[in-house]
Amino acid sequence: MKSRNIALYPGTFDPITNGHFDIIERAKNLFDEVIVAVAESKDKTPMFPLEQRIKMVEIAVKDIKGVRVAGFDNLTIDLAHEHDARVLIRGLRAVSDFEYELQLGYLNNSLDENIETVYLMPKLKHAFISSSIVRNLLKFNGKTEHLLPKEVQQIIGSLR
């Protein structure tokens, strides 16, 4: 019996953006299962609580077969072990992301040399989108409809 090829896509997803969604779709084309792992990230002081971020991601990916969502507050590598994931997905938007993401990849590999990190780029039309940009727009009631999955925009709109 062939083992399932499981990838873990960790992040804060505060909130999930169209760029994240694009990476999830791309990852699902490469792996049997993708687990979107939503980090507690208390040190980042997220705009949205963990439960709300998990709900937003679940709603955004509900129609993608083979994608599930998990919240976590431990080391990414430990979560990968819990779910038998052998690959970590990381998104790269620009050169500025590369150094940080490369360091994370090396760190995770130093903790478990059997875990690989795969870097995926979103489509060019999503390359400028980040959760921090969205959060800044939300603080000032700026337009975010073109940056977020429709269902996520609706949830955020209902919270305002």
Image (tube, rainbow, N blue to C red):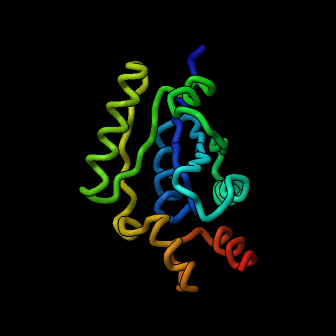
Q: Is residue 80 above or below residue 144?
A: above
Residue shown at 65% from the left, 60% from the top:
60
Query: Against 65, is 110 above or below?
Result: above
Locate residue 131 relative to residue 158 in the image: left or right: left
Residue at the (52%, 34%) spot, across then down: 76
Question: Residue 64: x, y in percent?
Answer: 63, 51
The x, y position of residue 95, in whole percent, is 24, 56
Q: Nearer the viewer, residue 88 or 33?
A: 88
> Can you name the residue that lies furthest to the top here?
1
Residue 78: percent from left, percent from top: 56, 26
Task: Give the total number of marks visible in the rendering.
Answer: 0
Question: Which quadrant of the figure has residue 89?
Answer: top left
Looking at the rendered image, the quarter that the C terminus falls into is bottom right
Q: Quadrant of the N terminus?
A: top right
Indicate left or right for 99 with 116 as reference: left
Q: Is residue 62 visible?
A: no
Name the residue located 66 percent from the left edge and 41 percent from the top edge: 70
Residue 93 location in percent, x, y? 34, 58
Q: Residue at x 52, y 55 (%)?
A: 44
Q: Nearer the viewer, residue 128 or 73?
A: 73
Residue 160 visible in the current orientation: yes
